[in-house]
Amino acid sequence: MATSDTRTRPVTLRDVAQLAGVSVATASKALNGKADVHPDTRRRVQEVADRLAFTPNSLARAITAGRTGTVGLLTHDLEGRFSLPILMGAEDAFGAGSTSVFLCDAREDAIREQHHLRALLGRRVDGLIIVGSRTDPRSSLGPDVPVPVVYAYAPSDDPDDASVVPDNVSAGRLAAEHLLTLGRRRIAHVSGDPTYAAAQDRATGVGQALAAAGLEQVGPVRFGSWSEAWGRAGVSAALDADPGIDAVVCGSDMIARGVLDALRERGVRVPQDVAVIGFDNWEPMIAGSRPALTSVDMNFETMGRRAATRLFSRIAGAAERGVETVAPRVVVRASTASG
């Protein structure tokens, strides 16, 4: 009769204890690795648990231990351009099987963010990683959130919080320096929305590299939208104003796709006549570009790993605070390579 019961309802710790001939307390200690259990008893309890396919109530165990082995990742990045590689990096740092990550998309909506926040806290997550859609500082969730929080991509506006962000000034500088090492001296810059900190920071970095080389940028930074259409229009305007341009820094890979299209339509060879470099090393854009696009990789997976590591430190009680920047790198492909 007892065997029949365990097939029609979830197997409980009491079932394991009864079949193993021990108390519920002893069974619990045996399965949780407590030291004060005889090895033979531990082995017998484990064998029974395996035979009955007993799965401990993870939430009940977590309440006792103070941890659930889960983390919430709350993103505002609709396209997954930043959040997915950050998620992969975070999962690498958390370790396979040791921590589960719940991913929620707030869609840049404050009300939706609060809804997901309540849902994640209701699941008793051990901590939260908040991923922004742009690098401008965002409002802190505040000190009343009952679990540790780390902000990724978009920093918190509270210096007491822990944030991990890309270094966009260095990214702009690297992009220009790469073109300069190729002998390019007539460099234009077609970027995205000027209200984004990323656009301004990358422009600053490009300007720094050119100034260090004793050069001036060809024309102003042509700000527009983060789109292929703007890439086509922006580079066309730049070439109409100065046909001698020999390189273009593009504010994103999407803009760079449009730039490459416009250059091809004009009969301008890439990279022989004009070298082109983008930002983000975003696979959906890179995969279809002609020629293959050189891009500044912002190392989002590293950002995810660092966010996870800092979150672990905060969960463990460390006083993690302040903004940490992640260094970018240039991934060279055919749009700048000469041979």
Image: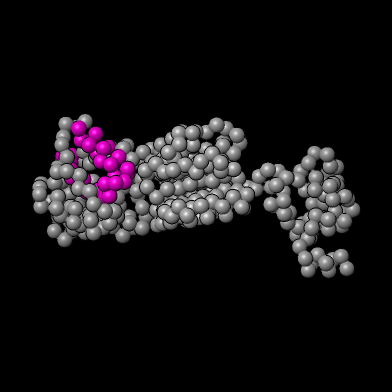
Q: Residue furthest right?
A: 21
Q: Position of residue 137 (x, y in %)?
A: 39, 41
Image position of 195 (left or right of 3):
left
Residue 211 visible in the displayed image:
yes
Residue 97 visible in the displayed image:
no
Residue toward you, 289 or 84: 84
The total number of labels drawn is 0
Work out whether 214 lies above or below 110. above
Residue 187 lies in the magenta-colored region: yes
Q: Quadrant of the N terminus?
A: bottom right
- The residue lying at 88 percent from left, 50 percent from top is 22
Work out whether 50 lies above or below 190. below
- The residue lying at 84 percent from left, 42 percent from top is 37
- The residue lying at 21 percent from left, 59 percent from top is 261
- The residue lying at 47 percent from left, 55 percent from top is 111
Say how the picture is coloured: one colour
Work out whether 208 lies above or below 120. above
Residue toward you, 51 or 248: 248
Residue 39 lies in the magenta-colored region: no
Q: Position of residue 124 (x, y in %)?
A: 63, 49
Q: Position of residue 180 (x, y in %)?
A: 21, 38
Image position of 32 (left or right of 25):
left
Image position of 305 (left or right of 271):
right
Q: Over which residues does the magenta segment extend? A: 183-211
Q: Position of residue 306 (x, y in %)?
A: 48, 40
Image position of 336 (left or right of 328):
left
